Image (cartoon, rainbow, N blue to C red):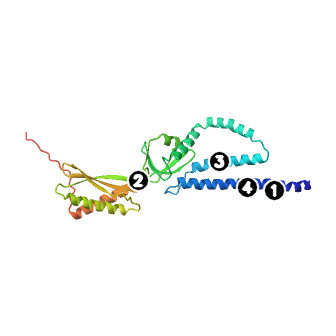
């Protein structure tokens, strides 16, 4: 008995070495694919898409197991047949899950949404995409809350992606100045303030601001200031800082923002 075990040791060692090599190769392939996926899907948040990584890992490990079974002369045909029949039954029972998986894959492959993108859905929900998993996509709102959206719902929703085609967004701020204002001076001062406020942000857009006069209003000459935010969620802070700085500078320069005035005439009885 001992002699038989000793004689079998080289064969056992060979089988163990083969299995170890196969799974070592699988790990190398999985790590290499993960690096490729990370390079393609990584964004400024430092996150990648876990759905693609999980699916590819599952496929590669399944192939590795079939290779090991084939090495030990275990017929894989019945296994494949059983997987085919069982797969149909599973597909019927997990239709919703499969819809979410394929919807997630479609979102990733189409590149309409990537991790790190700031999106707004047709139902009003908005935030930054954190991950796309098997069943759902997680979106972090501006307030820091985590919104969990089934992939199939996301794929069928009307989505505004504020990171495409570029991250910069335009903010339009309507302003009015008194009719006796020097409009050249108004434009110069407004652009100086806008440029300073934009460049004081942690991230700023290289697109210069604009001043566009457009209306002779009832009590003011009205115009729009177009300033650019490097990121969607920074627009509130940028607008806040600009209005404060512009109001202060207008007061220093003697530029008047008039109150709306209405004259009411009472007819005598």
Decide which of 4, 21 is in the foreground and name it. Answer: 21
Residue picked out by circle 3: 58
Marking on residue 21: 4
Q: Residue at x 83, y 54 (%)?
A: 11
Badge 2 marks a residue whose secondary structure is: helix
Mark 2 or mark 4, which is nearer to you?
4
Disc 1 + disc 2, Cβ < 8 Å: no
The tag earlier along the polypeptide, 3 or 2, is 3
Place residue 12 in its image quadrant: bottom right
The tag earlier along the polypeptide, 3 or 4, is 4
How far apart marks 2 and 4 lie (CA) works out to 49 Å
How far apart marks 3 and 1 lie (CA) works out to 27 Å
Decide which of 192, 125 is in the foreground and name it. Answer: 192
Residue picked out by circle 2: 232
Marking on residue 13: 1
How far apart marks 1 and 2 lie (CA) works out to 60 Å
- Give the x, y percent position of residue 266: 11, 43
Q: Residue at x 30, y 55 (%)?
A: 210
Res 245 visible: no
How far apart marks 3 and 4 lie (CA) works out to 18 Å
The tag earlier along the polypeptide, 2 or 4, is 4
Number of numbered discs visible in the structure rendering: 4
Disc 3 + disc 1, Cβ < 8 Å: no
Badge 1 marks a residue whose secondary structure is: helix
Q: Residue at x 65, y 35 (%)?
A: 88
């Amino acid at each position: 008995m001992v002699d038989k075990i000793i004689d079998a040791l080289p064969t056992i060692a060979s089988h163990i070495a083969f299995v170890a090599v196969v799974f070592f190769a699988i790990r190398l392939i999985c790590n290499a694919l993960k690096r490729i996926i990370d390079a393609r899907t990584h964004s400024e948040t430092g996150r990648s898409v876990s759905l693609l990584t999980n699916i590819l890992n599952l496929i590669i490990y399944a192939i590795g197991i079939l290779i090991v079974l084939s090495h030990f002369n275990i017929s894989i045909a019945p296994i494949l047949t059983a997987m085919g029949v069982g797969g149909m039954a599973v597909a019927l029972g997990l239709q919703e899950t499969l819809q979410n998986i394929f919807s997630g894959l479609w979102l990733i492959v189409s590149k309409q949404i990537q991790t790190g993108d700031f999106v707004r859905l047709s139902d009003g929900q908005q935030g930054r995409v954190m991950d796309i998993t098997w069943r759902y996509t997680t979106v972090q709102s501006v307030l820091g809350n985590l919104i969990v959206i089934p992939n199939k719902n996301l794929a069928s929703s009307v989505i505004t992606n504020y990171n495409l085609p570029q991250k910069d967004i335009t903010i339009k701020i309507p302003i009015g100045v008194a009719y006796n204002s020097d409009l050249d001076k108004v434009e110069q001062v407004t652009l100086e303030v806008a440029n300073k406020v934009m460049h004081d942000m942690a991230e700023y857009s290289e697109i210069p601001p604009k001043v566009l006069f457009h209306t002779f209003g009832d009590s003011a000459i009205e115009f729009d200031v177009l300033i650019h935010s490097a990121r969607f969620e920074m627009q509130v802070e940028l607008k806040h800082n600009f209005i404060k700085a512009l109001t202060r500078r207008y007061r220093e320069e003697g530029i008047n923002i008039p109150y709306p005035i209405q004259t009411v005439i009472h007819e005598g009885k």
